[in-house]
Every structure is written in C-alpha cells, then in structure tokens.
Image: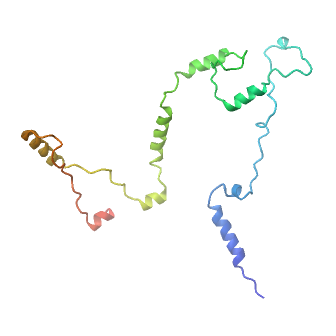
C-alpha cells in the first residue's frame, strides 16, 4: 500500500505559516520556558555596607535585621510603590538624605496636571504617519480633508448683501464649492 505524503507536508506548511505569525508563537505553544530571574526573586533585603564599621549596633540573637522592613512596611511598599521622598507617611526614622534632597531639587518643578493628556496627544500624532506597506498600497491617495469647502467669492458677496439689506450674517444659504467631476485619468492619479 502506498503512503500519502500530504499529512507530513501539511504539518510542515502549518509550521511555516505559524512561524510567520510572530515572535510569540513558540511561547504561545508552550515551547519556550522562561525561568525567573534569581536576582529579582528575593525573600530578604539586600545586605548593605555601613559607612563606618565602628557605628554598627551590637548583634542580638533573634532580633530582626535592621535593614528589613516589617510586614506592614512591605505591604505598603507593594501597594503604594510611588510614595514621594518627602511624604510624611515614610517609615519613622527614615529621613530624606542630602543626596535625595539634591536629586529632588535638580529634578525641577512638578509635572503639569495635564501631562497624561499631552503625552497621549503626542503619541497619537507620532503613530498616525506610521502606515504599513499594505495600507499605503490599498489607500495610496491621501483622504480628502473633512468638511465642505466654502466658495469664498460667493460667500463674501452673500455677506455684503446681508449687510446692505440689514439682515443677520447667518441669513441665507452658505455657498459651497462643488467638486468637479474628475476624468478617468485624473482618478488614476496620472
């Protein structure tokens, strides 16, 4: 009996097509395993070198480590990680150092209240010109500007007539420029 090569070829074709879907295909299919970073997964506070060895407190067996925070402090740090350096809710005994104060002073004034709106507007402006090749091929012409164009000469004449007759400026129909019909070659852009 003769075997059919179609199922193996279909599997190879499916693998090639799936590889074009993106970089996360292997992760989606469970082929990539990401191990946690051992430096990020810590249960104890990092050790720090004191400025002077003579100022070290005497060790007491069973006492909590001085650089570790209480469970409440750890929970607060997880819930509100952005407490400012001059916040009165900081841990007692923890003052703003000279370096932190200099950093705050050098950082300049506070951000404006509408900073999120500004950033959103700027990023929207930056995203608009980035059109893909497919978009440029399908939509090769720039879209017409929104709205209707007013015929300036006829509108000026209408406003002069309204002023001469003592009527309101809004009285009458605003003349609109009618787009002329384009020829076949003009529609092609030639």
Quarter of the image with the C terminus is bottom left
Number of dots carrying numbers: 0
Q: Residue furthest right?
A: 61
In the rendered view, does 187 fall on the left or right side of 22? left
Residue in the image at 77% along x and 43% along y: 36
Q: Quadrant of residue 164?
A: top left
In the rendered view, does 83 fall on the left or right side of 3? left
Q: Nearer the viewer, residue 134 or 154?
A: 154
Q: Position of residue 129 (x, y in %)?
A: 44, 48
Residue in the image at 50% along x and 35% along y: 116
Quarter of the image with the N terminus is bottom right
Q: Is residue 39 above or below residue 8?
A: above
Q: Residue furthest left?
A: 165
Q: Residue furthest bottom?
A: 1
Q: Is residue 5 above or below residue 91?
A: below
Q: How is the image coloured?
A: rainbow
Q: Position of residue 156 (x, y in %)?
A: 14, 44
In the rendered view, does 132 fall on the left or right side of 175? right
Q: Nearer the viewer, residue 121 or 70?
A: 70
Q: Quadrant of residue 41?
A: top right
Q: Quadrant of residue 77?
A: top right
Residue in the image at 69% along x and 74% along y: 9
Q: Position of residue 170 (x, y in %)?
A: 18, 43
Q: Position of residue 104 (x, y in %)?
A: 59, 20
Q: Is residue 100 above or below residue 116?
A: above
Residue in the image at 84% along x and 14% along y: 56
């Amino acid at each position: 009996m003769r075997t059919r090569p179609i199922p193996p070829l279909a599997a190879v074709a499916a693998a090639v097509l799936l590889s074009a879907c993106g970089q996360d295909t292997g992760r989606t299919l469970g082929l990539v395993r990401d191990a946690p970073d051992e430096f990020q997964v810590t249960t104890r506070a990092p050790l720090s070198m004191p400025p002077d060895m003579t100022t070290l407190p005497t060790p007491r067996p069973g006492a909590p480590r001085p650089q570790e925070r209480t469970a409440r402090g750890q929970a607060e740090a997880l819930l509100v990680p952005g407490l400012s350096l001059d916040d009165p809710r900081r841990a007692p005994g923890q003052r703003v150092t000279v370096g932190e104060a200099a950093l705050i002073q050098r950082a300049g004034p506070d951000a404006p209240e509408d900073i999120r709106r500004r950033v959103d507007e700027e990023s929207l402006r930056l995203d608009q010109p980035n059109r893909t090749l497919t978009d440029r091929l399908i939509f090769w012409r720039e879209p017409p500007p929104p709205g209707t164009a007013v015929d300036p000469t006829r509108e000026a004449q209408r406003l002069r007539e309204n002023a001469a007759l003592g009527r309101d400026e809004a009285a009458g129909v605003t003349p609109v420029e009618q787009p002329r019909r384009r020829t076949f070659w003009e529609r092609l852009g030639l």
